[in-house]
Image (cartoon, helix red, strand yellow):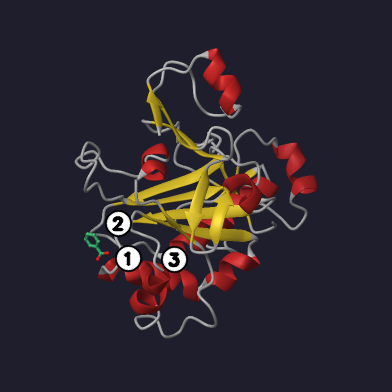
Amino acid sequence: MIEGNWMDEEMKAMIGYIDFCDSSRKYYTRGDLQGDINLLLPATAVNMRLGATIPNFTAETTRGRIKFYDWLGDSWAVLFSHPADFTPVCTTELGRIAVHDHEFKKRGVKVIAHSCDKLRTSNLTVGIFPACRDIPGDFPYPIIGDEKRELAVLLDMIDEDSKDNEEAALTVRALYIIGPDKKLKLSMQYPASTGRNVDEILRVIDSLQLTTRLKVVATPANWTPGTKVMILPHVKDEDLPKLFPRGVEKISMPSGITYVRTTTDY
Ligand code: BEZ
């Protein structure tokens, strides 16, 4: 382990892998400098605002070591953390996402979970399978084992109360949707007390993919695929017939300004 709060040019040259650090941060490297540098992490989180590029981290998973960008390829991804193994709510989340794996695949989305517990294959069989007997076939997605919580820190998945507790910091229920361009498209953070809703995860993926494909619309509150979407205000009325040949509805508002235009032609 090499630890420091700066990195000089010699060190940078030796490591040759600095794609998300700057010289004012504290860095950690782990591994053999002559060989594979499998982790180079600042002691604080990287920028996880929407639009930020997710770093190309390396992680140990239930399916072996992955390099994030290689694993992601040209797909979308859902990366989600859960506070602890062998806990009831986490088990339901891992199980429900596994049961709906075909829905993620249908949308071209790879799924990967994150756990701060030791990687124990038995977790999958002992912890999840008996609770979720409706998972068809093998457990469908990898789980990252991040016992040292390095990735949890890097990706800002630890809450304010736990962040300084190096021993026992559990992650929150963080869920990141990452685009094929490796950028963060959507972020959800739920507390340990509240399990996530798989239908909502799929719904926001549908919205993200639709609005990436068709940049002139946005999806309204409670939207579900097939129902009306909103046409963005910058789209000119004269362009509507070409963009939406099957029709647009213009809603009269009390203000007299017609800014609500909807369509199901998408
Ligand atoms: C659970 O998954 O059940 C859980 C985990 C950590 C704290 C509270 C609940």
Residue occupied by mark 1: 90
Any atom of ligand 1 within 8 Å of the CB at mark 2?
yes
In the rendered view of the protein, which quadrant contains the N terminus?
top left
In the rendered view of the protein, which quadrant contains the C terminus?
bottom right
Residue type for callout 3:
Val
Residue 154 place in picture, x, y as percent: 41, 38
Q: CA distance from mark 2 to mark 1?
A: 7 Å
- Contact (Cβ within 8 Å) of mark 1 with mark 3: no
Q: Is residue 101 above or below residue 174?
A: below
Residue occupied by mark 2: 83
Q: Residue at x 28, y 69 (%)?
A: 86
Left-right relation of 180 to 2? right
Residue 198 visible somewhere in the drawing: yes
Circle 2: element type: loop
Residue occupied by mark 3: 198
Q: Earlier in the sequence, mark 2 or mark 1?
A: 2
Circle 1: element type: helix
Instruction: State which mark lies toward you, 1 or 3.
Output: 1
Residue type for callout 1:
Cys
Residue type for callout 2:
Pro
Q: Earlier in the sequence, mark 2 or mark 3?
A: 2
- Contact (Cβ within 8 Å) of mark 2 with mark 1: yes
The quarter of the rendering in which ligand 1 is drawn is bottom left
Any atom of ligand 1 within 8 Å of the CB at mark 1?
yes
